[in-house]
Image (cartoon, helix red, strand yellow):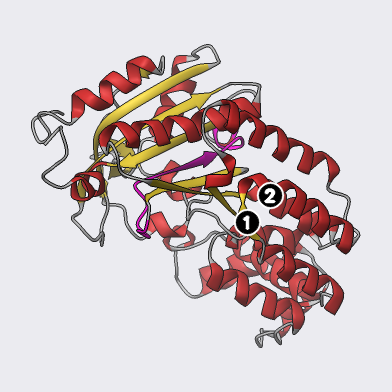
Amino acid sequence: MTSRYPAFAPVILDHFAASAAELVDMPIIQPADPFLDMAGEDLRRRIFLTESETGETLCLRPEFTIPVCLDHIAARAATPHRYAYLGEVFRQHREGGNEFFQAGIEDLGEADVAEADARSVADAHALLARLLPGRPLAVTLGDQTIFEAVLAALGLPRGWQKRLARAFGSPAQVEAALADLANPPRAAALPGEIAELVAFRDQEALSREIGAGIARAGLSATAGRMPQDIARRLIEKAELRSVRLSPEALDALKGFLAIEVPLDRAAAELSDFAKAAGLALTRTLDAFSRRVEAIARRGLEPAGIAYDAAFGRPLDYYTGLVFEVYEDGSDRPLAGGGRYDRLLTLLGAEKPIPAVGFSVWIDRIEKAGGEGTPWL
């Protein structure tokens, strides 16, 4: 682990020890399905897939969060529990190389969400400050919880809420979704029987008809999506096309996404937005304010952190806080993380486990450090 960075790893390991995080190692070969199911399309296109002798789909470890969560579930470990890691991960089509090191901390089971979120941001910032001493760092913070609360308060149907939540953090996807909300696209032509079943929202019968069509064509359902998935998606698209957002609601949503202020002003800005738009967001904004206060108690100045209402990160499992840390003046994040409260349940945990974590990109930190950095 330390051979490529003989003086780099001890700095990280010392930080882990000071943070009371248990250092763990995960196998490099991992089952692929959890990543394919949980981590979203961006990661699907980038992982290295292989197959076991028994036909199980495997992959080279593309990140640590999911393996750490799976290991926690398998061990039936008590919570709260903090895990730390330092090791290689593997991605295709990545600038800088397909094999690189990541380090990070996953904080599982802490009931005080505001404190756990603040600790994650502060830990990531403190680790980078140790690795890049004297270098100014910038933090950008977003919150998917607030975005989803705005969508719900605007009265959007559940299907639209899900589509926009999945698009959060991708300006192009959000823009496309808003365009469809303003002017719903026309439906693609479907065979008569299929179109009728979609119109009646009969998912069970539609699944059977699609399955029969796949069989008649001599195709295998396992080669693509299952008939039930195709039926659900066709009905969902039809429901989305039936909704046209009012100009007032569309303007409110665009106004929310345009909010970008220092974190110390964000709660007031969001409160003013909610009042002007007539949206009830009190409980969500109270939780946001508690996190801002907790971040300040951790020694980070909220005035120096950027809050961007449209900011998200390209992994589907985030549910609340999202953040990235940069060297000031750069647009390439050195660390990133966020909250993922639903992930452990989806991975098989018997009860919900709140979770938040971050990772740092070692190669980017090394490049940012330069020859004058003490650990080089």
Name the quadrant of the C terminus. top left
Left or right side of 77 for 335? left
Residue that carries the numbered disc 2 in the rendered image = 265
Q: Secondary structure at mark 1?
A: strand
Instruction: Determine which residue is flagged by label 1.
Output: 261
Residue 336: image quadrant is top left
Q: Nearer the viewer, residue 80 or 264?
A: 264
Q: Look at the image and tell me whether residue 352 can be seen.
A: no
Looking at this rendering, what residue extends furthest in the top direction? 78
CA–CA distance in space, label 1 to label 2: 6 Å
Q: Does 272 appear in magenta?
A: no
Placement of the N terminus among the 4 image quadrants: top left
Magenta range is 329-345
Residue 286 in the image: state x and y as whole percent: 78, 37
Left or right of 203 in this view: 142 = left
Looking at the picture, how far across and down is residue 201, in whole percent? 80, 67
Q: Is residue 268 above or below residue 353?
A: below
